[in-house]
Amino acid sequence: MSANVLFDAPGPKARVRNIIYSVIGTAALLGGILWVVLRLSDQGEFDAELWDIFNYTGIQQNILDALIATLKVFALAGVFSLVFAVVLCVARLSVHKPVRWVAVAFIDLFRSIPLLITIFALWVGLFGSMTPFWALVIGLTIYNGCVQAEVLRAGINAVPKGQMEAAYALGLRKTQVMASVLFPQAIRSMLPTIISQLVVTLKDTSLGFMVLYPELLHSARLIANNTPVNGVYPFVQTVTVFGAIYIGLCLLLSSLATWLEKRGRRTKTGIAVAAAAEPAETPGVLDPSAPLGPSTEAETTAALPGVSPSDEVDKKD
Amino acid sequence: MDVLLDNLSLFREGFFGTLKLTGASAIVAVVVGVIIAGFRVSPVPPLRIFGTLWVTLLRNTPLTLLFLVAFFIVPKVFFPDLDSFLLATLACGFYTSAFVAEAVRSGINTVPLGQAEAARAIGFTFTQTMRLIVLPQATRTVVPPLSSIFIALTKNTAIAGAFDNVELFNVSKTLSNDGYDIAMIFLWITLAYLIITYAINGLFRLMEHRLEVAR
Amino acid sequence: MKLRKSAAAVAAVAALSLAATACGGKEGSAGDKPEGPDTSGSKALSYDVKKDAAVDSAVFEAAKKRGKIVIGAKADQPYLGFQDQSTKEYSGFDIEIAKMIAADLGFSPKQIEWKTVDSGARETAVSKGDVDLMIGTYTINDERKKQIDFAGPYYHAGASLLVRKDEKDVKGPETVRDKKVCSIVGSTPLQNIKKPKYGAKVTELSKYSECVAQLLNNQVDAVTTDDAILMGYAAQNEGKLKVVGKPFSDEPYGVGLKKGDAALQKAVADAIKAHQESGDYKKAFEATIGKSGSEYQEPPAFTDPK
């Protein structure tokens, strides 16, 4: 349902009213922004000296190093989490009960522990000694792998059952059915959601501050804390600059998701592509009552209750 | 076992700290989120722009950065004597509100077209259509994603531990500094989080069930 | 469609490279006023690097092998352990002490790999071996001795209070009742000031500099930690802050190292002693915290390592 279904095409009266609302709304918005800006400039936050710190090559180099450090973690964690997700997803859909149990328990456990704690625990050496870099990468991999696994599973569940049956009828083995029939279609239909989750992965690299990994936010804090100018710590300035960097990076990824979603709509596989704007945080609900019992046809083919991507899929079919 | 028994009051404080922060932020997130979702489908363009801006900005910013804004910039704009709990609630609540707004908006999109059309046909205004017809029906589809959003929120409150708030993660750090075995601390803290997240999940299942009956 | 995607990518790359290269790019260190106090000032100091240093310690052998010694330091404490964010160089009294020790262990300043370690992460970083030595306003106490060993003390600090210049009410620890006092999570001065005897309301953040920023913002009324650290902030924000009251605790600073490494502990202690006797210690003191107003005190006697 698009927005314009919710209200009539405005007549002359409504148009006037909408214009009045628009003016008031714009005025309130601009007024609010102006007030904040004035308050800040009262306290000297817009003094050239405070912003000048970003003109130094040293600081720029510092930011660039941090950006590269962030992207390095993101690239590794992104790739690893997807690989890990495929493994977890296969285990989750396995016909062997114990394998399925382990996968369910693992996914449920790590989706309900804060990532911050997982990273911290990895770093202080719950499972042997680890450098901050690897603690961050592995922490991100475990958590996002679990989430992506659920996304993939929803995608596989959305593949029409006939596809799988036809593949088996052709004499393909289980691995072949998975690899050449189910996964390609699942990944295709879930790509926007997968990318949305990658945006979350990118944002979560900022948790590296806890384990002293020199990523973007770590460097932002140090710059804000270590370069006071005339007794003012440049928090406003660093937050503005680093916020812009993060938002830019994330938007770049999100726009990729939107573009894929649009492109996906044109294909004729009959499987709807999940909305890009959908569950960016945890696409699946933690599901304690998820069937742990014997594998029935219903279990593997029924949409997971509460998993929004599949909800979306159902609605569109 | 020692860690838990020796520091029972600390654990309790942390547990309720997390619970309090989650609850307060959830309320802020739902209220703000529904309003923002309303903005995004409203007939007034500036409100639509504001809604889109709000969601885009908050969804693409790391929560830690928002905490820096809350603790070092907000007091400058308003007044310095703001409570840490309030600031943390605002940071978590506003961040989560962007996700709630998106969930509500896609919920609105699942209400059959005919419903809104019928409402318009009998002369309802936009606010009436939303309040009486669309939102109540959207609730059903919004509830499942909300549950995962709140679970994410519970976990996100851990970041508040670094900013003058006592919650579970903060407690785990204090105890690991005191030299207790990290594996044991980790175990208990995990258990506490599991209790909270499972409780949220159960609560929402119950709600889903109720709403199904109401259909 | 394809075009738009690649256009977006090009735009992104262009924006990034612009950010990196544009704006002319000034040299030097940001934030330092040309005539302002010199927080580094210690460049003139140098120490003879011992060529034939040998210590019977696994940590030392590993460092020797990789040709670098990893030293944990603070990065946000002016005149003690401070990292200039544009040059990425460390300076301060703790940094000088670290260089002295490194020199006696056979590592030149270039062979030191600095790692910024926040207060709350110090024990973990040392016991895990993330750093070989931890030198960063590190108070020796029994709690910490359970996890790691210390060499020293090399300096005695004491908890004190930092307030705004125009503050009238707070004069010492007895006058902080119902005032907002900031310090970092789990620090000892904070535990003290929270006690009913003083009755302060506390704010716990993760860095002292964040406390100082809140103090300047009027969000808190005082910051408490060791006087040497506070003096540094007072000097860094000249004319806006002051340190009040007599020190109300004793904080002996030591060098943190891995538990059970007696040989390295002795080597570090010997190095500090040698430099105290040669006068390097005093020179370093005067070039660093001396400038922030701390009085020079004779180096404290070493405590028994056990």
Image (cartoon, rainbow, N blue to C red):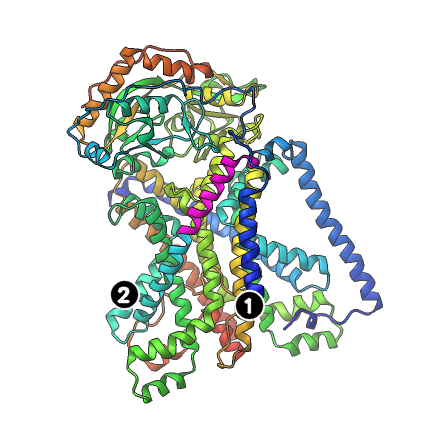
Question: From this viewpoint, which residue is outermost toward the bottom?
Answer: A169
Q: Position of residue C60 (x, y in %)?
A: 21, 31
Q: Position of residue C138 (x, y in %)?
A: 33, 26
Q: Is residue C224 magenta?
A: no
Residue under numbered circle 2: A102
Under mark 1, the amino acid is Lys
Q: Name the mark on residue B173.
A: none
Q: Position of residue C251 (x, y in %)?
A: 34, 21
Q: Which residues are magenta?
A: A54-72
Viewer-proximal residue among A140 and B87: A140
Under mark 2, the amino acid is Val
Whether A241 is drawn above or below A168: the answer is above
Q: Is residue A182 left or right of residue A308?
A: left
Residue plotted at (69% across, 70% down): A6
Whether B155 is drawn above or below C1: the answer is above
Q: Is any atom of residue B18 visible in this view?
A: no
Both labels 1 and 2 in a single chain: no
* Local secondary structure at mark 1: helix
Does the magenta stretch mainly form a helix, a strand or a loop?
helix
Question: How dense is the environment of label 1, judged by Cα within 10 Å: few (below 14), some, or many (20 and up)?
Answer: few
Question: How dense is the environment of label 2, judged by Cα within 10 Å: few (below 14), some, or many (20 and up)?
Answer: some
User: On the image, which quarter does residue C302 sit in?
Assistant: top left
User: On the image, which quarter does residue C159 sit in?
Assistant: top left
- The chain under label 1 reads C
Question: From this viewpoint, which residue is outermost toward the left?
Answer: C56
Whether B45 is drawn above or below C122: the answer is below
Q: Is residue A55 magenta?
A: yes
Viewer-proximal residue among A28 and C24: C24
Residue under numbered circle 1: C2
- The chain under label 2 reads A
